[in-house]
Structure formats: structure tokens, C-alpha cells
Amino acid sequence: DLTAAVKYHYRDLRPALERASARETAARVAVGAICRQFLAQLGVRVGGYVASIAEIDAELGAFSYPERINRAEENDLRCPNAQAAQAMQERIRQAMLARDTLGGVIEIVALGLPAGLGSHVHWDRRLEARLGAAVLSVQAIKGVEIGPAFENARLSGTQAQDAIELDEESLVRPTNRSGGIEGGITTGQPLLIRAAMKPIATTLTPQRTVDLQQGQQTDTRYERSDFCPVPRAVPVLEAMVAFVLADALLEKLGGDTLAEIKTRFAALHRPTLKDLHLDGKEHVFWPEDDTDAPEA
């Protein structure tokens, strides 16, 4: 409320309070639902789940990505691990009794993406940049990583990379520490986005603030909030990721009909030897006989 009042010179804080509300994400989810239907026509699935709330980790290593997405719909916490979901529910109950709020980490996964979406050439078309901006635009999301990025930061280069191996004609990667994107471009592996949601600042417990009209130090007055909005943020982030991916696919494929788009999607290059066109010759940036080369 304060930052908006400083920026826009409001005479009342209500316009900031209402306009910044997460209620506006209802429209995003509606648009995202259409994008998810479009992606499904191309075999791309977007799903999300709660990976942690406060200090409670869901411990999801035993579940595949499809299992995580499916199991997340089986409880109100949207946590694939039912045991962890019970612990999270109890932790939220404790926060309610303590008149406090909780945050957590949400993971969004995209399965079936082709290699080649995004760009390494243009900073504003790097796919992780576009996804990061979309995810960070959601209220209370204060951090985002592609794959286990912060974990990778603790490793050496030989530990953090995804080695490339040859499986007949296909170029495969046994690991996916890049989270499905390298150099701003999708690799064809599962895309994993992890988003950190901070606890909502509006708490039942009064906090120190300033009465701007009276110019005096005071305490906050509680109006309304949510003790833990993390599970409800999952479909919002799913929608934002689906929107960006649908846009990236349409940008690459073009086409005026779904049938045309599907034909072009099927013809996309894959990470295989036959789809690469490397001639093995040394690259020369300015050939001597190139009349367009700049003068020395």
C-alpha cells in the first residue's frame, strides 16, 4: 500500500489495496485454462504441486512428475505426498492459533515440450527470462529457479552439468539439472520451475507501522488475509507457465489453424544426429571474398 501511495500520490490507500489484490489472478487462470487446452493438443502437459510449506518438505524424490501432478489433486494442500500434506495441515493450524501466516515452495512442471523453444540470441526471448517474469508477477512470489538452480550453485561444474550421450541416433541426457532449459532454449526434457511464496504480511498479530494521516507510530489493524495461500497459488502459476509456453510455441510454429500448427509441430527438429547439419568445417566469420565484410 505504501509503495503505491508514494508512486501514484493516492489520497487513500484503498485503490492500492484493492488493485494489488490476488483476486485479479482469476482472469489469469481463465486464460491459462485455454492455453493448457491448446498445449494438450500438442501433447504438452502443465501441472503443479506444493513442494514445501514453511519448514516441512514434501520429499517427492520417490514420485515421477506425472505422479506428482496426479497425486496433488487428491488433497486440499495440493501436495503429492499424503503424509507430508497432513504435517503441512497441522503446521497451518499451528500458525492460525499463533495468529501468523506461512509461505512455501511451489513446483510447476511442463512435460512433452519440444527442444528449441526460446532463444539464446535475444535477452528478452530467453525462455527462462520470460517464465521468470511471468511467475514473479504473481502476488507474494519472491523467488524463482529453473530446476535445482540454488542447489547447483553449491556444486562444481562437473557435478552440475547434464552430460550428453548417444542413444543410437538420439542425443540424450541422463540427468536434468538444467531444469529443461539451456542457454534460453528448451532441451526437450521436463521443464521444472520452482517458485518461493513469502508469508502474507497481513497478520492477526499487530505489527509496527505508521498512521500516515496522523503521522504517528502505531500498530496495524487486521482487515482480512489468508493464513497460507500456497496451495491456492498452484493453479495461478500453472496458468502463467501455460500462457508463456503457448506463446513461445505459437511464435515458433505460426499457422492459422490447429491442423496447420500440429503439422508444423510434428516437423520440428529433434535432438538427433540426422536433424543436425554440422559440416565439420572451421567457421570463418568474414571470408576473404565476402564483399559484405566490414573494412579493417
Image (tube, rainbow, N blue to C red):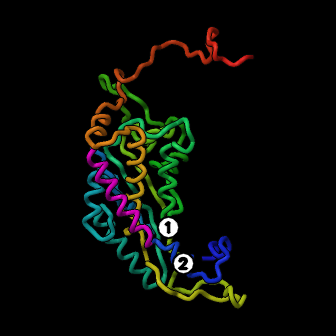
Nearest to the eye among marks 2 and 1: give it: 2
What residue appears at the point 34 percent right and 39 percent down from the top-left corner?
255
| Residue 220 higher or lower than 154, as above or below | below
The majority secondary structure of the magenta stretch comes to helix
Between residues 103 and 42, which one lies in front from this camera angle? 42
Say whether disc 2 or disc 1 marks the residue closer to the N-terminus.
2
Q: Is residue 25 magenta?
A: yes
Q: Which residues are magenta?
A: 23-42
Q: Disc 2 and disc 1: Cα gap in Å? A: 12 Å
Q: Residue 162, can we see it?
A: yes
Q: How many discs mark residues in the rendered view? A: 2
Residue 288 percent coordinates (x, y): 64, 9
Vertical comparison of 90 with 262: above or below: below
The image quadrant of residue 169 is top left
Viewer-nearest residue: 203 or 243: 243
- Residue annotated with mark 2: 17
Q: Residue furthest top?
A: 289
For this orientation, the residue located farthest to the bottom is 214
Query: What kind of residue is marked 1?
Result: Gln
Identity of the residue drawn at 55% across and 35% down? 121
Quadrant location, the C terminus: top right
Amino acid tagged 2: Leu
Residue 180 lies left or right of residue 33; in this view the side is: right
**Pointer 1: what residue?**
139
- The image shows residue 95 at horizontal and vertical percentages of 44, 79
